[in-house]
Amino acid sequence: MFKFIHAADIHLDSPLHKLDYYDGAPVDDIRQATRRAFNNLVQTAIAEEVHFILIAGDLYDGDWKDYNTGLYLVSQTSRLREAGIPVYMIAGNHDAASKITKTLRLPENVHLFPSNQPATHTIDSLNVAIHGQSFATPSVKKDLSLRYPEPVPGYFNTGVLHTCASGREGHEPYAPCTLEGLRSKAYDYWALGHVHQYEILCDDPWIVFSGNIQGRHVRETGPKGCVLVTVDDRGRAEIEFKPLDVIRWEIVTVDSNGAESGYTVMDRFCNRLDTLLEKNEDRPLVVRVVIQGETTAHSELLANVDRWGNEIRAAALDTSGHRVWIEKIKFHTRLPTSEKDLQTGDGAMGELVRLFDEYSDQPDLLRGLSDELMDLEKKMPKELKQDPDRIRFDDTQWLKSLLAQARPMLIQRLMQKEDSQ
């Protein structure tokens, strides 16, 4: 029996993704998060007494600002050398972009696969064969797996590959391959990298994305870590996901349907937060809150966004004991208005509703509105343009969403004005 760890997408010293814009952000903690997660990886490998580690690309995050990143890596891989644990890794698209990486001398227990063609490393004492190929450039668009060698007879064969597989949302289409193509190689395990979400593509044989070891922004939510693989004497493998992240990103969606007041929405947020804290044990959380649904509290919430945002932040501090930092709060609520009469009406209100419907249903109208608003964007303050969630007049889907939010607000205000006359 033997054990190994499959990890990928370490992104050592990955820069903050505009987190400095957010007041109160735990910048120092998040800046060190990728190193602390990598330290957890090394510690897990030593504690589990694994026989080797596979890293499926993107150990780095592009070119380094200085040599400190490399020195940190050498110090950690030296710990693994002292524990008798070799590391077999391939360069991914971010590694290939790094110039300093090419000159770094790593400890002798670290083996980097070449980029000109696939190669094989064998561990004869375990009857293990490891096949892999590094990226030669930051953008590899061909299927590297096609040239991977035949399996070594009588050995446990593992392929290490940095790939988008058959395509994954939010990831560049690098080294695309198919599930059928990987299975046809008759390897016992495929250690995949590039996709940052843990995913099992197949269990016969195992074809697995380990995901990255530390989430870096709100698009990388949930547990992040590595895969511990245990192979029995018959060559049968079992896998276990091992969390390594030191700070976890989460999105809390609060259903406001039927809520009669802002305080009802607040109670629902606190209940959701309690569940989230219990699920994530003692780990610090960075949370984006999304309030959505039909509620009579819609106008109350949007009339004083700052107040309710601060109410949510205060409740998070009180409930979590400073374990939770609220990254952003989004209000996507709407009024529960019945619009059948409005849509068929002949008056100004019916005309307004039909106008909103026309813009939502006709892309050409949205594009025309987008063109008219682009001049306004040029006059916007620089701070708004740099915001990760800034106004995007060139995005017709964003405009459509904005109109959907504005529609019930405008109708409600006009109806209230009519009633007061």
Image (cartoon, helix red, strand yellow):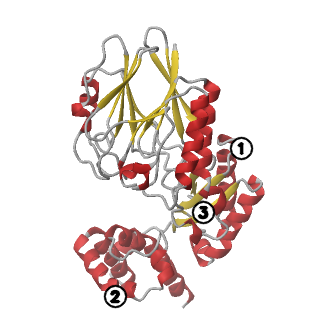
Q: Kindly indicate whether the residue at mark 1 contacts the one at mark 3 (C-beta within 8 angstroms).
A: no
Whole-angstrom CA distance, mark 1 to mark 2, is 48 Å
Task: List x then y, in percent, for residue 365.
Answer: 25, 76
Q: How many C-alpha atoms fall within 10 Å of the one at disc 3: few (<14), some, or many (≥20)?
A: many
Query: Which label belongs to residue 327?
Result: 3
**Which of marks 2 and 3 precedes in the sequence?**
3
Q: Give the residue number, with chain letter if any, for mark 1.
A: 282
Q: How many C-alpha atoms fall within 10 Å of the one at disc 2: few (<14), some, or many (≥20)?
A: few
Relative to the observer, which residue lies in front, 259 or 252? 252
Amino acid under disc 1: Asp
Q: Is residue 377 above or below residue 312?
A: below
Q: Give the residue number, with chain letter if any, for mark 2.
A: 375
Amino acid under disc 2: Asp
Query: Which label belongs to residue 12?
Result: none
Whole-angstrom CA distance, mark 3 to mark 2, is 30 Å
**Which of marks 1 and 3 precedes in the sequence?**
1
Relative to the observer, which residue lies in front, 185 or 346? 185
Q: Quadrant of residue 374?
A: bottom left
Q: Is residue 244 visible?
A: no
